[in-house]
Amino acid sequence: MRILAVDYGQKNIGLALSDETGVLARPWKVLAHISRPVNAASVAQLAQEQGVSQILVGVSYDEEGNPNHAGRVALNFMEELKAQTGLPVQAWDESLTTQDARAARLASGASRKRRAGHLDDVAAAVLLQGYLDSRGQA
């Protein structure tokens, strides 16, 4: 069961894939943001090509537990994605995924130049791994 995670941003869209067993997440791809319908079509096509059975979309929340502005944008994207694919699409809390991605890149010993690159796919992998780990504990 392969799962695709989406870190939907204003400039870039980070994608991560699970392995076939649904245990390990890996950063996969970064897409440039174009428009919500075009972005959803691109992600839907990639999901189909990779044999994905489920899609997670990262949503950020405010202190009260409500989606903040970026979270609402991600939820709107999620609805567009649902309309363009027959796959189950689920929201998942993306709190601190970018910070965790930075820390993981630093801990891996990546050079300063490599650490300065996009973190969107790594953030999507952090999001996906958190989801996969939570399923194992259920």
Image: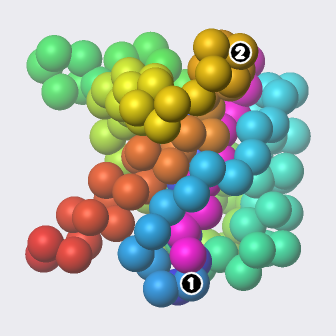
Q: What residue is rendered at 33% in x and 59% in y?
A: 131
The answer to whether residue 71 is seen in the rendering is no
Q: Position of residue 19 (x, y in %)?
A: 56, 76
Q: Which mark is residue 20?
A: 1
State whether residue 7 is above or below residue 69.
below
Q: Nearer the viewer, residue 138 or 88?
A: 138
Q: Main secondary structure of the magenta part?
A: strand
Q: Position of residue 11 (x, y in %)?
A: 73, 18
Which residue position holds label 2? 113
Question: Alpha carbon of mark 2 to alpha carbon of mark 1: how far?
Answer: 32 Å
Residue 18 within the magenta-colored segment of the rendering: yes
Q: Position of residue 137 (x, y in %)?
A: 13, 72
Amino acid on which disc 1 is placed = Glu
Amino acid on which disc 2 is placed = Lys
Q: Position of residue 102 (x, y in %)?
A: 46, 24
Q: Which quadrant: the C terminus?
A: bottom left
The answer to whether residue 112 is seen in the rendering is yes
Q: Secondary structure at mark 2?
A: helix
State whether residue 115 is above or below residue 36.
above
State whether residue 24 is above or below residue 29.
below
Count the marks.
2
Q: Which mark is residue 43?
A: none
Specify the segment rendered in magenta. Answer: 11-19
- Density class for disc 1 (Cα within 10 Å; few <14, some 14-19, many ≥20) is few
Q: Is residue 98 left or right of residue 119?
A: left
Q: Nearer the viewer, residue 60 or 133?
A: 133
Q: What residue is rendered at 80% in x and 37% in y?
A: 31
Rendered image coloring scheme: rainbow
The answer to which quarter of the image holds residue 51 is bottom right
